[in-house]
Each structure stands twice: as structure tokens, then as C-alpha cells.
């Protein structure tokens, strides 16, 4: 017949989150949010640049091929 020891029940439960782990969780969430907003802004800027003429891009110090390369490298990071 099997016996169950009651003193071992509940000891395998995960420890309560500490203040440090909560701060690191919030920091990771904040950094992910900031990165998403930067990507969103860069996507908006690239869309605007795509509508400019070659002369207007040259006025900004960039060529169309540089703009396309920059956009592709950003999109490949997904």
C-alpha cells in the first residue's frame, strides 16, 4: 500500500516573484515597446521617402538605392 507524506506537498511550487524579477520583467516589456515604436516610426519614414523624387532624395543626401537597401534591411529583421 502506498503512503503519501503531507510535508512534501506544495514545496515544488514556484517561488513568489521578487521585486528584482518584477523590475526586469517591466524593463523587458518597456524595451520591447520602445523597439516596436521605433520600428513603426521608421516604417512611416520609409514610406514617405519612397514617394520622393530622385532630386528630393539627393537633397536629403541619399540615393534611391540607399533608401531601398535601408528599407529591405529593416524588413528582413522581422
Image: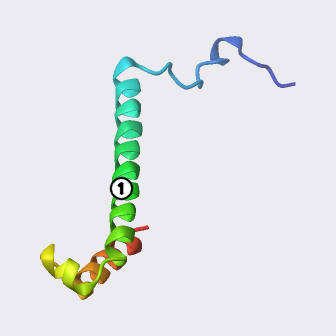
Residue 48: image quadrant is bottom left
Q: Closest to the observer: 26 or 56? A: 56
Q: Element under label 1?
A: helix
Q: Position of residue 75 (x, y in %)?
A: 40, 72
Q: How is the image coloured?
A: rainbow
Residue 3: image quadrant is top right
Q: Is residue 78 above or below residue 40?
A: below
Q: Position of residue 6 (x, y in %)?
A: 71, 12
Q: Is residue 6 above or below residue 46?
A: above
Quadrant holding the C terminus: bottom left
Determine the residue located farthest toward the right in the rendered image.
1
Query: Tag 1: Cα neighbours inside 10 Å, few (<14), some, or many (≥20)?
Result: few
Q: Position of residue 18 (x, y in %)?
A: 41, 19
Q: Position of residue 52 (x, y in %)?
A: 31, 77
Which residue is pictured at 36% across the width and 56% down the height? 41
Q: Is residue 3 above or below residue 56?
A: above
Quadrant holding the N terminus: top right
Which residue is pictured at 34% across the width and 42% down the height? 31
How many numbered badges does the structure rendering display?
1
Which residue is pictured at 35% across the width and 26% down the height? 23
Residue 50: image quadrant is bottom left
Determine the residue located farthest toward the top in the rendered image.
7
Q: Closest to the observer: 60 or 20? A: 60
Relative horizontal placement of residue 43, taking residue 62 as reference (left or right): right
Q: Closest to the observer: 24 or 68? A: 68
Which residue is pictured at 76% across the width and 19% down the height? 4
Residue at the disc numbered 1: 41
Amino acid at each position: 500500500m502506498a503512503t503519501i507524506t503531507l510535508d512534501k506537498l506544495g514545496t515544488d511550487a514556484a517561488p513568489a516573484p521578487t521585486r528584482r524579477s518584477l523590475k526586469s520583467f517591466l524593463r523587458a516589456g518597456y524595451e520591447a515597446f520602445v523597439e516596436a515604436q521605433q520600428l513603426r516610426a521608421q516604417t512611416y519614414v520609409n514610406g514617405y521617402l519612397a514617394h520622393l523624387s530622385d532630386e528630393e532624395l539627393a537633397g536629403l543626401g541619399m540615393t534611391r538605392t540607399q533608401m531601398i537597401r535601408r528599407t529591405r534591411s529593416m524588413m528582413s529583421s522581422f
